[in-house]
Amino acid sequence: MSQQIFIIGLGQFGMALARTLSEKGAEVLAVDTRRDLVEEASLFVTESLIIDATDEGELARLEPGKRDAVVCAIGDDSKEASIICTALLRQMGTKFIVARANDKLHQRILRLVGAHQIINPEEEFGKRFANRLLYRNVIADRTIGDDLMLTEICVQQSMVGKNLIELALPKRFGVMVAAIRRGDSKRIRQPSPSEPLKKDDNLIIVSNELAISKLIKGV
């Protein structure tokens, strides 16, 4: 059964999230106060509606407590609205509330009124883009814990023709290769310690952020 996700606020972040979730098979209900944004979202989400999510009656009518998750993606224009909306969602028994924050104070207030998870898209993108700017061979990265990242990097020229045993990456740099994306198909496969790496391979590694820098500079 598809997950049912309710997105409140169809600014740039909310719209992109709604589109991506829909493409991945989720049943998305998207709402906003602006008709043009709701009409745009209607082209790809399951249902889109014009409502004011700070109106308790209107919000309750959509039964947020029955959804798998609700994302309050209200943007910079109204911190007050995002706080009210988050508080109402928690009051209505919503299982999992993700709220967008604009700054540290906003984050603290959203947590106090009941958000289960806080996100700051601009801050998170800035951190990820910094790594891609500093380390041009980083293709993608994702935080998976307080001090751990899942990072995909291109195989360095000095690695080509060597296997993982020879490279000894855990010992030398503190990184663990979790998978390899190989060839033109870019199919993800389990790494073979004795198989030589190829120039078009990508390594998917688990490490802390400092280890990525050491790896790219040191091999």
Image: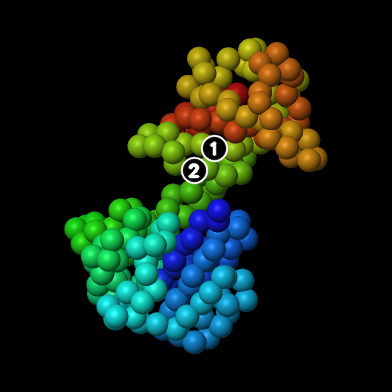
Residue 36 in the image: state x and y as whole percent. Answer: 53, 86
Residue at x-position 40% and y-position 82%: 51
| Quadrant containing the C terminus in the rendered view | top right
178 above or below 51? Answer: above
Q: Nearer the viewer, residue 158 or 147?
A: 147
Residue 207 in the image: state x and y as whole percent. Answer: 47, 29
Residue at x-position 61% and y-position 71%: 44
What's under tag 1, amino acid-wise? Thr
Q: Nearer the viewer, residue 141 or 92?
A: 92
Q: Which residue is disc 2 drawn over? A: 142
Identify the element where label 1 is drawn.
strand
60 above or below 181? Answer: below
The local crowd at label 2, few if under 14, some if 14 to 19, many if 20 or more residues have their Cα within 10 Å, is few
Identify the element where label 2 is drawn.
strand
What's under tag 2, amino acid-wise? Arg
Q: What number is the disc on residue 151?
A: 1
Residue at x-position 54% and y-position 27%: 215
Is label 2 in contact with label 1 (beta carbons under 8 Å)? Answer: yes
Quarter assignment of residue 196: top right
Sequence-wise, which precedes: disc 2 or disc 1?
A: 2
The local crowd at label 1, few if under 14, some if 14 to 19, many if 20 or more residues have their Cα within 10 Å, is many
* 160 displayed left or right of 99: right
Tell which residue pokes out farthest to the right in this image. Answer: 184
CA distance separating discs 2 and 1: 6 Å
44 above or below 192? Answer: below
* 103 displayed left or right of 41: left
